[in-house]
Image (cartoon, rainbow, N blue to C red):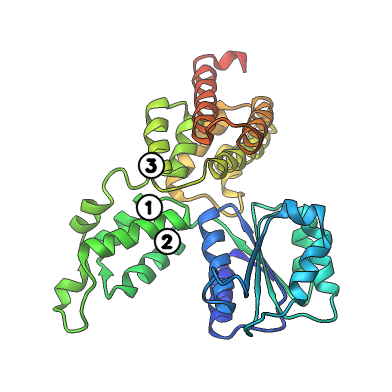
Amino acid sequence: MDIKAGQSEAFVAGYVRKPDPALRVALVYGNDEGMIAERGRTLAQAVCADLGDAFRAVELSGAQLKDDPARLGDEFQSLSLIGGRRVVRVRPAGDETVDAVQTVLDATAGDALIVLEAGNLPPSSRLRQLVAAAPAGAAIACFEDGERALEGLIEQVLGAAGLRADNDARDYLVDNLGSDRGLSRSELEKLALYKGIAKPDAPAAARIVTFDDAVAVIGDSAAIGLDDAIFAAFDGDPGALDRALDRVFAEGVAPASAIRGLQRHADLLHRLAGAIEAGTRPDDAIARLRPPPHFSRRAALQRQARTWPSRRLADLVDLLLEAEMQCKTTGLPDEAILRRTALRIAQGARSLARAPARR
C-alpha cells in the first residue's frame, strides 16, 4: 500500500484501533524526522506497548541487515517466549535493506510487525517501491507539517489536556511553531503544562489557551529549531544560526539528523535553482514543490534560490556527505561537526550575496 502524506495520520490511527495481522512491513519515510519517529513508535506500540520488552521488541539497523539480510526473516518468524506478537524496528533504514525486507514478504510463516524508519526516500527508491507494491506492506509518507496539519496537531495536543486555543492563540502558534512534528508537539505539551491540565468541571474560561498564554510559553524563540537553523545557514546569518543550533541541541536533536536536514534543503534549493535558471518564475517554481512549503517560508526560499546557483549547491552535497560521514566514523564531537559545517554554508551564502556577478 502507498499511503500518501495526507492519509498517513488516519492510517496510523486506524492501525492503533485495530492492528491488522496481515500487515508485515510498515515503512515510515519522509522529510520530517520528528513525525517519522512518532509514527514509527506509535505503530510499534500498537503491537507491543512496552518497547523495552526484550522478548517482544527488537531493534536493528539498516547496516546490520545489509551484512546479514536473513536476520530480518529470522526475527519475523521467531516466537516470543512469553506470548504476544513481536515487533522489529529497523532504523535508520534505506535501500540497503531491500533484500532483507524481501525475505519477510516472501516468508510462509511469521507474524511479527516490521517497522522501518527511513529518511526522505525518492520515488525511485527500491525499498519504497517494494513496500508500496506489497499487499502485506505499507509505505507511509511523513512530510513537514503545513498550516492545516499544524492546526490539527494543536487541537489534538491541547484537547488531550482538556484545553482549547482561541483564534488568536491558534494563529500565533501556527506562525511560530516549527515544521518538525516532534519539536512542535514538545512545545505544545509545554504550553499545556503551563496552562494546567483542565478538570472536567473547570470554568470554560480556564480551559481556553489565549494569545498571551501562547506568547508566554512559546515566545519569539519558539520557531528557533532545526528548520530555523537550516534557513539561517542558507540565508548567511551566523548570529541566528548560532541561536538556532543552541535550541536544536537543547531539544535533543541528533547532529547527524540536522546534517541530513541540511542535505534535504540543499537538494530542494538545487531543484528550485535549476528551474529558475531554466526560465521558470521563482514563485511558479515554489508553487510546484510537493509537498508545498509552509507559507511563512516561501519568501526565504525564493531569496535563497536566487542567491545559490545550482553549481554551488551541487558542491554542498559533497560537503554535507563528508560531514555526515565524520559524525559516524571519527572521534570528533558531532555538535562541533554540525556547527562547523553549518557555518561554512552561512559563510558561502554571505559571499554569494556580496558578489552576485561572479555566480
Indicate which disc residue 185 carries. Answer: none
Q: Is residue 98 left or right of residue 272?
A: right
Are the residues tagged 2 and 1 within 8 Å (C-beta)? yes
The mark closer to the camera, 2 or 3, is 3
Q: Which of 81 and 30 is in front in this view?
A: 81
Residue tagged 3: 247
Q: Residues within 10 Å of mark 2 (few under 14, many from 20)?
A: many
Residue type, label 2: Leu
Residue type, label 1: Leu
Distance, label 1 to label 3, CA atoms, is 13 Å
Q: Nearer the viewer, residue 23 or 227?
A: 23
Distance, label 2 to label 1, CA atoms, is 8 Å
Q: In the rendering, at what x and y percent does residue 100 appear?
A: 81, 62
- SS under mark 1: loop
Is residue 133 visible in the rendered image? The answer is no
Query: Quarter of the image containing the C terminus?
Result: top right
The first of marks 2 and 1 along the sequence is 2
Residue tagged 1: 177
Q: How crowded is mark 1: few (under 14 residues within 10 Å), some or many (20 or more)?
A: many
Identify which residue is drawn at 65% across, 83% down. Answer: 20
The first of marks 1 and 3 along the sequence is 1
Q: Which of 350 and 168 is in front in this view?
A: 350
Q: Is residue 217 left or right of residue 46?
A: left
The first of marks 2 and 3 along the sequence is 2
Query: Quarter of the image containing the N terminus?
Result: bottom right
Residue type, label 3: Arg
Distance, label 2 to label 3, CA atoms, is 20 Å
Residue tagged 2: 150
Are the residues tagged 2 and 3 within 8 Å (C-beta)? no
Task: Residue 188: name its quadrant.
Answer: bottom left
